[in-house]
Image: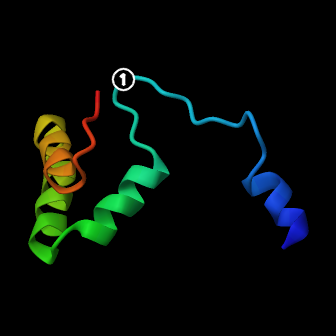
Amino acid sequence: MTRLKKYILAPGINEDNYEGNLGFEEMVKFYRMATSDEIEEMEMAVKEADWEEFKQIIYKVTNVKLQ
């Protein structure tokens, strides 16, 4: 674990932030907090490429506003 800790906790490593970016952390948070219906709703929005609906669902569940 010591070897992995160096990489996991390495200072100065940040995720890129750009318009439309959705990070791993936000998706994990969504799946942990969402109900089955909300997950289904989000997956349908992705299938339909309805990104505005997708962002609204993520915000509704996680309170994280995507750009």
Rendering quarter of residue 19 = top left
Q: Residue furthest top?
A: 19
Query: Which residue: 80% across, 53% down?
Result: 7
Q: Secondary structure at mark 1?
A: loop
Rendering quarter of residue 14 = top right
Q: Which residue is mark 1?
A: 19
- The x, y position of residue 54, in whole percent, is 18, 45
Query: Is the residue marked by circle 1 packed among few (<14), some (14-19), or many (20+) residues within 10 Å?
Result: few
Of the 4 image quadrants, the one containing the N terminus is bottom right
Residue in the foreground of this view, choosing between 1 and 41: 1
Q: Is residue 45 above or below residue 67?
A: below
- The x, y position of residue 40, in whole percent, is 14, 67
Query: Which residue: 21% across, 68% down?
Result: 34
- The x, y position of residue 43, in whole percent, is 20, 60
- The x, y position of residue 6, in whole percent, is 85, 55
Residue in the foreground of this view, choosing between 39 and 35: 35
Q: Is residue 5 above or below residue 53?
A: below
Q: Is residue 33 above or below residue 54?
A: below
Q: Residue furthest right?
A: 3
Query: Which residue: 34% across, 30% down?
Result: 20
* Count of numbered tags: 1
Q: Is residue 41 above or below residue 58?
A: below
Type of amino acid at the residue the image marks with label 1:
Glu
Query: Which residue: 19% across, 53% down?
Result: 47
Residue in the foreground of this view, choosing between 60 and 23: 60
Of the 4 image quadrants, the one containing the C terminus is top left
Q: Is residue 6 left or right of residue 58?
A: right
Color theme of the render: rainbow
